[in-house]
Amino acid sequence: MVKYEDEERAEEILERIEELEGNNNIEEYDEMLNEGEPIKIGSLEYSPSEVLKNVDETAYRCGFNDFNDNEITELKEELENLEVV
């Protein structure tokens, strides 16, 4: 069994990784996309996440997967740094 310098933080990281691997954070991805300006078409405004999801669902899903993969990689690196050698 692996030991960590900060067991509480390690547990938080492991729980977060599990959440990300289950793709249970689509709202976070949408929030990140929506940090930009709304998309205007004539007098109508749409959120960037809504536009991407409806215009190119494949790009939306690929972006979501990249978003999760990047965070998982960062969390795994942090977890490795917490390991007691």
Image (tube, rainbow, N blue to C red):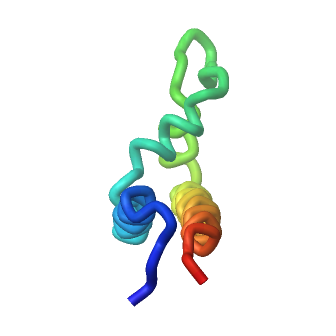
Residue at 54 percent of width and 58 percent of height: 64
Residue at 40 percent of width and 64 percent of height: 7
Residue 83 visible (yes or no):
yes
Residue at 59 percent of width and 57 percent of height: 67
The quarter of the picture where the N terminus appears is: bottom left
Taking the image as shown, residue 15 lies to the left or right of residue 59, namely left
Nearest the eye: 52 or 33? 33
Residue at 48 percent of width and 41 percent of height: 30
Which residue reaches farthest bottom? 1
x%, y% of residue 40? Answer: 63, 19
Q: How many marks?
A: 0
Nearest the eye: 81 or 46? 81
The quarter of the picture where the C terminus appears is: bottom right
Taking the image as shown, residue 83 lies to the left or right of residue 25, namely right
Which residue reaches farthest top? 43
Q: Is residue 39 above or below residue 30?
A: above
x%, y% of residue 29? Answer: 50, 46
x%, y% of residue 34? Answer: 56, 31
Nearest the eye: 42 or 1? 1
Nearest the eye: 41 or 27? 27
Q: Is residue 56 above or below residue 41?
A: below
Q: Is residue 34 above or below residue 24?
A: above
Residue 63 placement: quadrant:
bottom right
Residue 18 placement: quadrant:
bottom left
Residue 62 visible (yes or no):
no
